[in-house]
Image (cartoon, coloured by chain):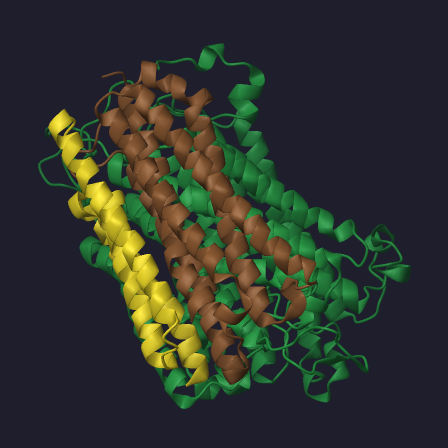
Amino acid sequence: MGNTQADYKTHVRTYIIVFAVLAALTMITVGVSYLQLAAVPAIILAILIASVKAGLVMGFFMHLINEKQIITSILILTAIFFVALLMIPVMMSG
Amino acid sequence: MSVAEIRYIDKPHPMTGVTNSKLGIWCFLASEVMLFGGLFSAYILLRIGAGSAWPEGSHHLNVPLATLNTLILITSSITMVMSWASLTIKNFASFKKYMSLTIFLGIAFLVVKAFEYGAKFEHHIYPSENTFYAIYFTMTGLHVLHIIGGLIVNLYLLFPGSGMWNKNPDQFMGRIEAAGLYWHFVDLVWIFLFPTLYLL
Amino acid sequence: MGDKSHTLPFWKKYIFSTDHKMIGIQYTVTALCFMMVGLLMMLIMRWQLAYPAQPLPGIGGLFGDGNAPGGIVLPEFYNQLGAMHGTIMIFLGVVPLSVGGFGNYIMPLQIGAPDMAFPKLNMASYWVYFVGGVIMLTSFWVSGGAAQSGWTSYPPLANLASFGQTMWLFGMVFLITSSLLGSINFIVTIIHLRVEGLSFFRLPFFVWSQFVTSFLLLLAFPPLEVASILQLMDRLLQTSFFMPSGLVVTGEALTVSGGGNPLLYQHLFWFLAHPEVYVLILPAFGIITEIIANNIRKPIYGYKTMVYSLVFLGFMSFLVWAHHMYLVGMGTKMSMFFQVTTMIISIPSIILLTSLLLSLWGGSIRFNTPMLFSLAFLPMFAIGGLTGLPLGLAGSDIHLHDTYYVIAHFHYIVAPGTIFALFAGIYFWFPKVTGRTMNELLGKIHFFFSFIFMNGVFMPMFIQGLAGVSRRLWDPTQYAHAVPTQPLNEFIFISACGLGLAQIPFIINFFMSIFAGKKVDHNPWKATTLEWVAASPPPHGNFDTVPVVYRGPYEYSVPELNQDFWPQNQEGKN
C-alpha cells in the first residue's frame, strides 16, 4: 500500500464507491424482503447479497485483495471448519 | 541488532509480508468467525426445529431501525479506514477527525440498539419469551459487546494511545490497521445478522 | 529495549512478568498444584467406590456435613468431585502445563527467539487462567456446591443444577479466553520469530506439535464458548436454548418457553472437546520425540512423515466429534460419516507411534529417567489408542458407551500417556530452567512405582466396562451386574494410593534439586536443539548472540564428526 498523495486519492475514491455499493445493496436487500418470496429463494438471495457486501468489506476495507497468502490460507482453513460447524443443524434435521 | 529485540513489530516479515500484530489480529478474527459461526449454527438448528412456528422477523423486529443501524455501521467502516489512510499520508489531524467520527457512529449504533431493546422490554418481551427472542437477544447482544469492545480500543487509540504516533509512527499505524480490521469484522457480522434475524 | 531485568521491581520480575520463561514457570507451578488437587479428589472418589458408604478414614471430618456427614461421601459431593476432577485435570492441569508451561518456556528457546511475539498478552493469558482457576475452585464453597453434572455439563441436568454450575460456566469463559490469547501468541511467534536458517522442516518436532495444537485451540474453542454462553442464558435469563418443550422436573412442569434442543449443546461441546483431546496429546508427543531423539543418539525415523501426520491429525480432529454421541439417536448416515472419519484419524496416530518405535531400532539408548518415562509412553499410548477403536465404531460402542471402558481408554492416553510425557519433560528440561539436574535414583523410583500403579488403577477398569459398569456412579453395588467386579474397586483404590505415594519421591526430588541438585553446564544431555545453546537458566533475551541454524533438529551420530551430536547452530564440522 503506497503512501503518496496519489495513492491516497485513489484509495479514497475506492472507499467512496464501495460505500455507495454497500448502501445500495442494503436498500436492495430490504426491498427484496418486501417481495415476500418463498423461504428457499428468500434465504438464498439474502445470503447472496450479504456475501457480496461481505466480500466488498473484506476485499477493500480489510485490504484482503492485496493481502499476502498467509492470511488467506488461515481464512480458507477457518472457512472449512466454519462449514463443518454449520453442518450441525443440517445433520440434526436429516 | 540488539539481542533482546522482538522483530517484525513495525516492519513486515519477509516471508509472510505482514507484521506480528497483523498476523495476530487475523488469527483472532478467525476465532471470532468460529464464535459467531457457532451462534449461526444454533440459530439454524432452532429455526428448523420450530418449523412454521418460527416468527417472521420483520413482523416482530424493527426493520427501519435496523436498516438505519446497518447504514451507520457501513459508514463507520468508511470513517475507520479513512482514519488509517490519513496516517499513510501523515495527516494526524485527519486521523483524529475520522477516528472521532468512527467512535461517534459506534455510539450512535448503540443508542439505536438501546431504543430497539427498550421497546421490547417495555412490552415485557425478554429473551425468555421464546427461542426466537432468545437467539435474537443473544446474537445481537454479543454483537453489542463486540461494538463496545471496539469502542474502548478506539477511544484508547484516539486519546492516551495516540502518543505512540510521535515515538513510533509505523507501529502506531499498525495498531490502527489492526483496530480497523477488528471494526470491519464487527461490521461484517452485522451484515449477516441483519438479514438473518430481521428479514428472513 | 536492552536488558532491564536487573532494574525491575519484585512484582514486575516475578508476579507480573512479561518474560516467557517466568510465565512458563508460573503456569507450571500453578498447573502442578491444580493436578495435586485433582489427584486428591480422585482418591476420595476411589475410596467411596471401593468401600461404598464407609466413612473416609482420618480426613472424613474435613468436608463438612453438607458433603460428607460422618465422613461418608454423599452422592451429591461425589458428583461434584467427579465433574471437577475432569475439569481441573484437563483445563487447569494438563493443558496449562503442556502448552502454557512447556510451550511458553521451551518453544521460544527452540526457535532462537528472545521472547514471544506478544509478551504482555502472554502475561495476561496466565492471569486470566489463574482467575478462571480460582473461580472453579471457590465454587466448592457456594451453596449447593461445585458443578456436578459431569465435566461435560450436559443440559437439561446442568441447566437445572445449583449455582456452582454458573460459576463453572464463568470459569470456562475465563479459561477459554486465556487459551485463545495464548494460541494467537504461539502461532505468530512460531511463524515470525524463527531465526535465520530455521525453516519449518528444520523445526524440532516439539515446536510443530505446539503449532498444530495452537490452531486447534484457536478454532475449536469458540463453539464451546457459544455453548457456555447459551447455557448461561438458559440458567440466568430463563431462555430455552437447550430445554425442550414439556419438560417436567419432580412432578412439576418447568415454566420456560421450551422449544430448545439438548443435542445442540452436545454438538457445540464436542466440536471443541474432541480437538481438545488432541490438545492433550500433541504436546506430549512433541516432548517425548525430543527426549527419544536425544537418548537414542540417532535421527528420528520419518521426521517429515511425522510432521505431515501431525498436520493431517490436527485437521481431521475437527471432523470426528460426534463419535462421542453415537447413542443420541443419530441416523445411520451421520453415524457412518463419523465412524469413517474416526477410523481415518487413527492412521496418523499410528504413524507417529510407529515412527518413534522404529527410531529405537539401532539406537544407542540411554536409559535415564526422562527416557524411561518417554519409552513407557509408547505402549501406554498404544493401549489407550487401540482401546479407542471399539468406541469409535458405533456397533461396539452401544455396549461400551458411558461405561468404565471409556474411562480406562482415555485415562490410558492422558495418565500413563500425557502425564508421563510431562514428567519426562520436567526431568529433561529441569537442568535448562535451574542449571541443576534432578536426582536419577529418586527419578527411577518415581518412574517404576508410577508405572506399576498407573496400570494397577486403569487396567481393571476395562474389565469393569466390559461387564457393563456405568461411569459416574456413586455406588456401583446398587446394580447387580456391577457386583461381580466390585472387588476390582478395592484393588484400584489401593493402586491409586500407591500412585499417590509414588509422587512423593518426585516432589522431594523436585524441591531438593532446585537447591542442592548437581550443577551442570548449558547442555548436559548433549542435545542438538537451540534451547541447549542458551545458558542454564537463560538470561532475559535468552541468547548472548542470536543463533543461526544450519541443519535439521536431530543430527546425531553423524559420521566424520568427533562428537555424536551436531548442534543446529554449529557452523561447520569440528
For residue C368, what is the image quadrant? Answer: top left
> Which residue in the rendered view is the most extreme toward the top?
C7
Horizontal and vertical percent for residue B66?
Answer: 46, 56
Horizontal and vertical percent for residue C507?
Answer: 60, 40
Q: Is residue C215 left or right of residue A64?
A: right
Residue B52 visible from this viewpoint: yes
Horizontal and vertical percent for residue C51?
Answer: 78, 70
Is B157 located above or below residue C135 in the figure? above
Colour given to chain A in the rendered image: yellow
Is B128 located above or below residue C544 in the figure? below
Q: Is residue C62 left or right of residue C228?
A: right
Colour given to chain C in the rendered image: green
Is B75 located above or below residue C196 in the figure? below
- The front one of C488 and C14 is C14
Q: Is residue B160 left or right of residue B15?
A: right
Query: Can you say which quadrant of the picture contains the C terminus of chain A?
Result: bottom left
Horizontal and vertical percent for residue C212?
Answer: 32, 52
Number of labels in the image equals 0
Is C562 located above or below residue A28 in the figure? above
Query: Can you say which quadrant of the picture contains the N terminus of chain A?
Result: top left
Q: Residue at x 57, y 17 (%)?
A: C10
Q: Residue at x 79, y 71 (%)?
A: C52
- The front one of A12 and A71 is A12
The chain assigned the colour brown in the figure is B
Residue C425 visible from this viewpoint: no
